[in-house]
Image (spheres, rainbow, N blue to C red):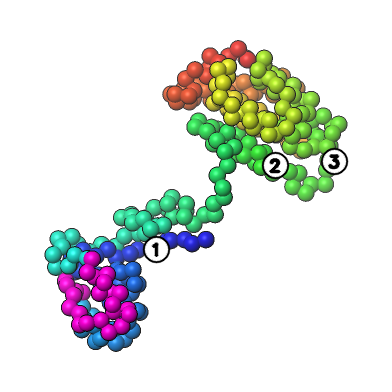
Amino acid sequence: MEIYLVPSRPKLGNGSVISFWHDCWTPLGPLFHRFGDLGPKGTSNPKHSNRAGWIFRGARSEAAEELLIYLTYLQLPSLSTIEDTYVWVVDNEELTDFSSRKTWNVLRNRGQTQLWTKNIWFKGHVPKHAFTAWIAHQDRLSRWGMNVSPLCCLCSSTDETRDHLLLRCEISESIWDLVLGCHFQAFHTWTAFSEWLSIRDAVTSRTLKRLAAQATISSIWNERNKRLHDGEARTPAAIFNTIDRFIRDTILGKRKLKAFTPLMQLWLPNG
């Protein structure tokens, strides 16, 4: 992977600051490195001067020819009214100020964009719930090597997998039934669940579906942990009451967002 990240690059203006030989102001790099110690003498340019123009004898090397060709496309510094500057260069983009965001986007590893991420990081998402949903979607919810029973912590009748725990367990299904009401449909696979979240229809707001789904996933996961670590158990109705209160508070808190304006009216029948 090629990364283009230059801390600072000289940008030629009137030639008053940039060093002709030592600064990297041409695509050839620092000219002193390209031409060596004999460069100033071989090109008739003094070693330590900041040039307002250039005086060159005929090219005697391939490097000198490349430089002469490049210089023919530049305005003479003596004709410029702009001061020399130094700019940050990130992915071949010149920036007057350093941008940590753009630098990070260039440096970080990037995978192929996944369409399912729109179900997770939608506008108005709740970060802690979105994070849990993101981990769940990648099937990374785990017992982290703990020496405990492999059975589901909610029903104790089937081995705990992501799809069973969050979708098919009888406790989870009861919670989903309360959350989605008459719009509930049993999700037998995570793929079907993801497709349902992506569907835009005239019955249910997609934003509300995503908000409620993430709150439900997070609540089921928290209930699982309480039962595993604390030995505490709540009924599906009690878990739903927590979800209901949270969704109402979230809709009120984000009511200025256009997508959230009609959600309270859509959600209240479930309460």
Kind of residue indicated by mark 3? Ser
| Quadrant (top left/top right/bottom left/bottom right) for the C terminus | top right
Pick whichever of labels 3 and 2 is earlier in the sequence. 2
Q: State yes or no: residue 59 in magenta.
A: yes
The mark closer to the camera, 1 or 3, is 1
Residue picked out by circle 2: 139
How many angstroms separate mark 3 from mark 2 (CA)? 19 Å
Splitting the image into 4 quarters, where does residue 24 fall? Answer: bottom left
| Residue 6: image tag | 1
Kind of residue indicated by mark 2? Asp
Q: Position of residue 194 (x, y in %)?
A: 64, 32
The kind of secondary structure element at disc 1 is strand
Q: Nearer the viewer, residue 152 or 187?
A: 187
Kind of residue indicated by mark 1? Val
The mark closer to the camera, 3 or 2, is 2
Q: Is residue 164 above or below residue 52?
A: above
The kind of secondary structure element at disc 3 is loop
Q: Nearer the viewer, residue 59 or 220?
A: 59
For the residue carrying disc 3, how many other residues have a C-alpha within 10 Å: few (<14), some (14-19), or many (20+)?
Answer: few
Residue picked out by circle 3: 149
Q: Position of residue 44 (x, y in %)?
A: 20, 84
Q: The magenta stretch spans which residues?
A: 50-73
Q: State yes or no: residue 174 in magenta.
A: no
Q: Nearer the viewer, residue 109 or 263?
A: 109
Q: Position of residue 237 (x, y in %)?
A: 72, 19
Name the residue located 32 percent from the left edge and 80 percent from the top edge.
Answer: 62
Name the residue located 79 percent from the left edge and 25 percent from the top edge.
Answer: 170
